[in-house]
Amino acid sequence: MAPLIATDCTSDCAPSSGYFSVGWNRFDFVLVCTALIDDLAADLTAYLPVPPFLLRVLRLLRIVRILRILKGVKGLRDLVTTIILSLPPVFNVCSLLALVMFIYAVLGMHLFATLVLQDNVESHANFQTVGNGMLLIATDCN
């Protein structure tokens, strides 16, 4: 695979082709070089100045390449903008739900904390602590 990438790089990345004049192309080139170094890192761990784990984390930046698509497709850009703008209200609803669950867990603790553990009331499904109460409410809502 490395010879294929090297051949493609030498043909497309020639100074006269203008490949590096586009920012996204430079970004792709850095990602490909990072991936190649990561593939070779298993053999060269003693010579690398950074741990191989860091190179794998840098490969996650490939996700950013999806943003290039948003530049050309207006409908997809509008959809992503709508999703981003709807995140704060979704966070507010989740916070309200967590508050209600907390209130019911405290109420359950007040009413049922002294129950003896049995078959249905076990060490994980009880109201002895707030955390156990919230887990019980979250899992037994059906």
Image (cartoon, rainbow, N blue to C red):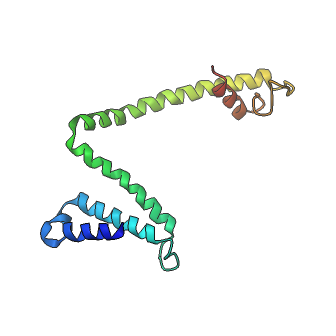
Q: Residue at x 30, y 67 (%)?
A: 4
Say which of 1 and 24 sits in front. 1
Q: Which residue lies furthest to the left in this view?
A: 16
Q: Which residue is drawn at 34% across and 64% down?
A: 32
- Displayed quadrant of residue 135: top right
Tell whether 83 sits left or right of 134. Answer: left
Question: Which of the image's four quarters has the N terminus?
Answer: bottom left
Q: Residue at x 53, y 26 (%)?
A: 96
Residue 42 horizontal/vertical position (percent) = 51, 71
Tell whether 117 sits left or right of 138. Answer: right
Q: In this view, does 67 lie above or below 12?
A: above
Tell whether 43 sits left or right of 83. Answer: right
Say which of 43 and 139 sits in front. 43
Q: Is residue 1 above or below residue 45?
A: above
Q: In this view, does 44 lie above or below 24?
A: below
- Displayed quadrant of residue 73: top left
Q: Residue at x 76, y 23 (%)?
A: 110
Residue 30 horizontal/vertical position (percent) = 32, 65
Residue 18 horizontal/vertical position (percent) = 14, 66
Tell whether 8 sits left or right of 138. Answer: left
Residue 122 horizontal/vertical position (percent) = 80, 30
Question: Which of the image's four quarters has the C terminus?
Answer: top right
Q: Residue furthest bottom?
A: 47
Say which of 7 and 139 sits in front. 7
Count all numbered tags in the image, as a single digit: 0
